[in-house]
Amino acid sequence: MKRYLATLAAGALLAVVVVFAVTPGSWAHYRFLTNRFDFAAEFDEVAASLRQLSATMATFYMTGGPTEELNAFPAERALKRRIFIDISNYMQDGVILVTDRDSTTLREISFIDPLHAVAVTAEDWYFAYQDMSRRRPLSTKKLNKVAVRYYLKKQWGRWIVLDYDVFGQEEALPAVPVEKIVRW
């Protein structure tokens, strides 16, 4: 009977080790669930990705989307495609959207699990339109105060933005849509 129980325990332990060894992110999940997750380091990495995203997006819109910057752009392919379609539509109309980020305040970051996070920022952007060929102003600068909810995933060792929602800064943000999280 003792031998049977020892064999059963060894088999169960081996199964756990195999699951941890084979399943991507399993050690990260273990650290997350046992409070060994380095929230401070991950918080800094998420904040750095959001800063890089804002800076790169502003450059994309003002220059017509230089493809050399694509790999530095911390966003998922579908989001990059959406932004480039937007830029292309402006370019077809002979217009450039000039963006200037005045300030960004990180309100909160919530980690759903060790590989998924939701961040909310308060952002002040100035927007103006220019003629693409002559770069002459077509509008005056307008201040836009927005709250942005970013949905992020850690892939290839860095945090990338999967999607985002924009709200008015004074608006109460609705609950995070379940379909956004389920889609991850």
Image (tube, rainbow, N blue to C red):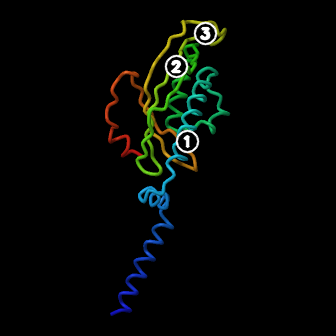
Which amino acid, mark 2? Trp
Q: Nearer the viewer, mark 2 or mark 3?
A: 2
Q: Which mark is residue 63?
A: none
State whether residue 129 is above or below residue 113: above
Residue 59, image x and y in percent?
A: 62, 25
Pick whichever, 169 or 183, lies toward us.
Answer: 169
What residue lies at 47% left-to-right and 59% top-to-bottom?
Answer: 31
Q: Is residue 183 left or right of residue 160?
A: left
* Circle nearer the viewer, 1 or 2: 1
Q: Which residue was labeled with disc 3?
A: 131
Q: Note whether 106 is above or below 103 in the view shown.
A: below
Q: Quadrant of the N terminus?
A: bottom left
* Type of amino acid at the residue the image marks with label 3: Asp
Q: Determine whether the residue tagged by mark 3 lies in a helix, strand or loop.
A: strand
22 w.r.t. 138: above or below: below
- Foreground residue among 93 and 42: 42
Q: Quadrant of residue 173?
A: top left
Position of residue 153 measured from the top left corner of the image (x, y, whole percent): 48, 45
- Please tell me which residue is depicted at 55% across the width and 12% down the height of the picture: 128
> Tag 1, which secondary structure?
helix
What's the residue at 57%, 46% (across, down)? 158
Q: Nearer the viewer, residue 52 or 162?
A: 52
Q: Secondary structure at mark 2?
A: strand
Q: In the rendered structure, which disc, 2 or 3, sits on the residue that comes first in sequence?
A: 2
**Residue 168 higher or lower than 49, as above or below:** above
In screen coordinates, is 32 left or right of 141? left
Q: Which residue is mark 2?
A: 125
The three-letter amino acid code for the residue at tag 1 is Asp
Percent x, y of residue 182 = 36, 46
Q: Which residue is labeled 1 in the image?
A: 44
Label 3: how many residues lie within 10 Å, few (<14), some (14-19) or many (20+)? Answer: some
